[in-house]
Amino acid sequence: MNFTSFSKQTNPYTLLKQRPQWHGENMMDSGIETEDLTIPDSSVDTGIFSQTNRGRVAIFIDGSSLFYTALQLGIEIDYAKLLYCLTEGAKLLRAFFYTGVDRNNEKQQGFLLWMRRNGYRVVTKELVQFPDGSKKANLDVEMAVDMINLVPYYDTAVLVSGDGDLAYAVNAIAYKGVRVEIVSVRSMASDSLIDVADCFIDLDTIKQHIQKDPNSAYNYRPLSNTSVQ
């Protein structure tokens, strides 16, 4: 398993109000409740974080990046398994899923409804069509703002993205005492992002724990009379 840790035994920052915050020794009474999760029967103890005291965890997932990563790995993500894998050994504050949306895509709307009802806070932005016909929605700003604003309420940030544009925000929260874990595949992860993180987890090494079973399906109801395939 490729699990590269850059964490130090002692906290190098002098500006922390608590020492060290990412070990969860003196968790703040934030007034924000953690998510209550019911572990599915299919969840697997990966052992990735068994030696790490992660405290309270906040997860930030770049939906588009994860989609293309899954294509590269040749798997379909089981988002229930992914959530429990990433929260192993910790309390979940929030799990954010950022994605561009096409309001006319019934299947996508049904999937996002399932996500909202199964532990995720979904943040969306309308897709913008470019002259070449491609569609894209950039949510880097939304991710960065949420990571920074929520710093007082979590100890560990799990960023599922390899986008180097997020390196500055990651470095900013690291200087506030947050432990940062980057989850991606090495070929799609920016060196500038990895360099400011505490550890990097290669999705290729844990794909067997997060991939969807061939016969499983997301149980959600269509939003209209149109059936969702």
Image: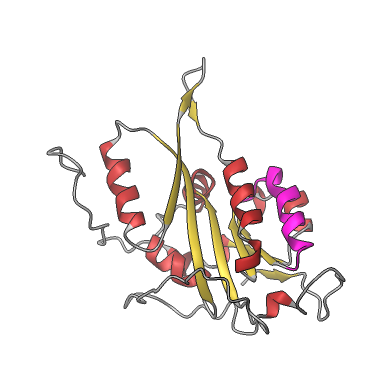
The image shows residue 154 at horizontal and vertical percentages of 61, 69
**Colour scheme of this structure image?**
secondary structure
Closer-to-camera residue (61/143): 143
The span picked out in magenta is: 161-177
In the image, residue 38 above or below residue 160: below
- Residue at 71% x, 75% y is 21
- Residue at 48% x, 25% y is 128
In the image, residue 109 above or below residue 122: above
As drawn, is 72 to the left or to the right of 27? left
Q: Quadrant of the N terminus?
A: bottom right
Figure quadrant of residue 195: bottom right
The image shows residue 85 at horizontal and vertical percentages of 49, 71
As drawn, which residue projects farthest toward the left? 225
- Residue at 26% x, 38% y is 106
In the image, residue 113 above or below residue 226: below
Figure quadrant of residue 205: bottom right
Closer-to-camera residue (141/130): 141
